[in-house]
Image (cartoon, rainbow, N blue to C red):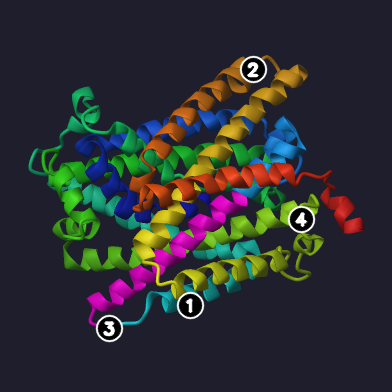
């Protein structure tokens, strides 16, 4: 579920050209490695605290235990904003991508919102039912998606490129040339959703064992997958040309992912990747839908949202009502954007991804601070593990503060909008944190809510 939310093929087709074209060119693979390192440091404290967090809810639950209910409620609002934003952004992207694909094969020209709403209807059906059905759909899509990229990487390595199997990307004078910070920024956005392992706590057989395992595996697999594939594209295109090719892609003059695929796997390979890009987007939006539905479920159990959202379907054992509410929320936002005539890529995806990125870094920063605060107060729970309970979370805080600075100082590159619009969008997660904290009230546990 988490790796599907990371949408590997979507990141390779979107974030990678951005990191190369606007960032440090051939050194972009190092940006993905740095992002993975920061998130790995975050994960150490995150999973160490897992046994001391009795309920699902990911960031909300961890921050509540570490920093108190008021801060936890603020973080809960930020999480809802971030996940809803990225989900709506992906709906806009997939609507555009389906229309672009149909047009490429000489199909009818249909407005993108119609495709987006068709996908939303399918996601609503799957999200309403038991999580295993969504997991099976995501599993098939993810296996196909990763398989074709691995095949592409192998083909590139076998064929080499204009400079052979070069390791130029990892030379200091190369990855420090240009804007390494921008490469790290777009690498970070590719990891959004990795912490969702804890959201599915109530549906895991052995959460104390499987949540840490899944979290570490997600960071390592996603980070390695991105870095290796990014390096493979540098090999295929050549370290001297890859930045220019990426910039042409951003200008709409070509497509780095599909063009490189056609050169390595032929026209059939290009067609397969084009289709799997759509399934990648679908897997991504379905995964985020499930995460948001469960966030609302937990928040309702805490008394922050209406108690009805904490109900469980009698037959599907799913937060069905919460899923329906999330579907309605996404539908309303999409309808407003469609009526306003917002561009699905720059306007919908760009701006929504920007809001989600700021929100996600803010959430992880608060969570790392919560880990440090919790183990300072409860020294009896440290078990002598200074690295896991103090040093790693503190280093994660420093890394995330640096990441936040990178995101905010380069925010117009993420949103594609004006400085004024970007400032307003960047302020939304911070405003959500403030509103959630100010609206704080004593919370009920889930059991108390059900009894009530």
Task: Say if mark 3 contacts mark 4, CB within 8 Å.
Answer: no
Q: SS at mark 4? A: helix
Magenta segment = 79-106
Residue 300 circle label: 4
Residue 107 circle label: 3
Residue 258 in sight from this viewpoint: yes
For the residues labelled 3 and 2, the Cα–Cα distance comes to: 60 Å
Q: State left or right for residue 189 relative to residue 381.
A: left
- Residue 255: x, y in percent? 21, 59
Please give the residue where the numbered disc 1 appears in the rendered image.
118
Does 92 appear in magenta? yes
- Residue 37: x, y in percent? 43, 30
* Sequence-first disc among 3 and 4: 3
Q: State left or right for residue 364 relative to residue 448.
A: left
Q: SS at mark 1? A: helix
* Sequence-first disc among 1 and 3: 3
Please give the residue where the numbered disc 2 appears in the rendered image.
385
Q: SS at mark 2? A: loop
Task: Say if mark 2 contacts mark 4, CB within 8 Å.
Answer: no
For the residues labelled 3 and 4, the Cα–Cα distance comes to: 45 Å
Does 30 appear in magenta? no
Identified at 45% across, 60% down, the residue is 89
Near mark 4 (Cα within 10 A), the count class, few <14, some 14-19 or many ≥20, is many
């Amino acid at each position: 579920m988490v790796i599907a939310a990371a949408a590997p093929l979507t990141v390779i087709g979107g974030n990678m050209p951005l990191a190369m074209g606007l960032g440090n060119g051939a050194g972009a693979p190092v940006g993905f490695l740095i992002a993975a390192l920061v998130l790995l440091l975050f994960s150490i404290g995150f999973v160490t605290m897992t046994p001391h967090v009795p309920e699902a809810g990911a960031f909300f639950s961890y921050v509540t235990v570490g920093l108190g209910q008021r801060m936890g409620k603020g973080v809960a609002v930020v999480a809802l904003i971030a996940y809803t934003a990225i989900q709506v952004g992906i709906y806009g992207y997939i609507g555009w991508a389906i229309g672009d694909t149909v047009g490429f094969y000489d199909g009818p020209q249909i407005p993108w919102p119609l495709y987006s709403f068709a996908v939303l209807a399918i996601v609503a059906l799957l999200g309403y039912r038991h999580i295993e059905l969504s997991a099976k759909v995501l599993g098939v899509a993810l296996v196909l998606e990763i398989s074709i990229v691995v095949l592409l990487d192998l083909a590139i390595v076998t064929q080499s490129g204009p400079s052979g199997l070069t390791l130029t990307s990892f030379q200091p004078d190369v990855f420090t040339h240009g804007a390494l910070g921008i490469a790290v920024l777009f690498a970070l956005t590719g990891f959004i959703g990795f912490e969702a392992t804890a959201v599915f706590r109530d549906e895991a057989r052995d959460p104390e064992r499987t949540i840490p395992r899944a979290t570490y595996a997600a960071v390592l697999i996603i980070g390695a997958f991105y870095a290796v594939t990014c390096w493979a594209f540098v090999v295929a295109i050549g370290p001297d040309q890859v930045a220019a090719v990426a910039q042409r892609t951003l200008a709409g003059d070509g497509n780095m992912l599909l063009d490189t695929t056609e050169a390595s796997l032929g026209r059939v390979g290009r067609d397969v990747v084009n289709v799997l890009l759509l399934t990648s987007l679908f897997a991504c939006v379905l995964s985020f839908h499930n995460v948001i539905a469960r966030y609302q479920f937990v928040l309702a159990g805490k008394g922050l949202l209406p108690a009805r959202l904490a109900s469980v379907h009698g037959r599907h054992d799913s937060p069905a009502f919460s899923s329906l509410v999330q579907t309605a929320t996404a539908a309303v936002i999409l309808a407003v954007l469609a009526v306003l005539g917002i561009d699905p890529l720059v306007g919908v995806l760009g701006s929504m991804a920007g809001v989600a990125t700021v929100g996600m870094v803010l959430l992880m920063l608060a969570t790392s601070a919560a880990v440090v605060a919790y183990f300072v107060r409860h020294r009896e729970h440290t078990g002598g593990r200074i690295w896991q309970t103090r040093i790693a979370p503190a280093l994660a805080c420093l890394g995330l503060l640096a990441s936040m600075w990178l995101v905010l100082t380069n925010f117009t590159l993420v949103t594609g909008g004006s400085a004024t619009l970007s400032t307003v969008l960047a302020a939304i997660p911070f405003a959500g944190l403030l509103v959630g904290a100010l609206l704080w009230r004593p919370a009920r546990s889930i059991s108390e809510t059900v009894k009530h």
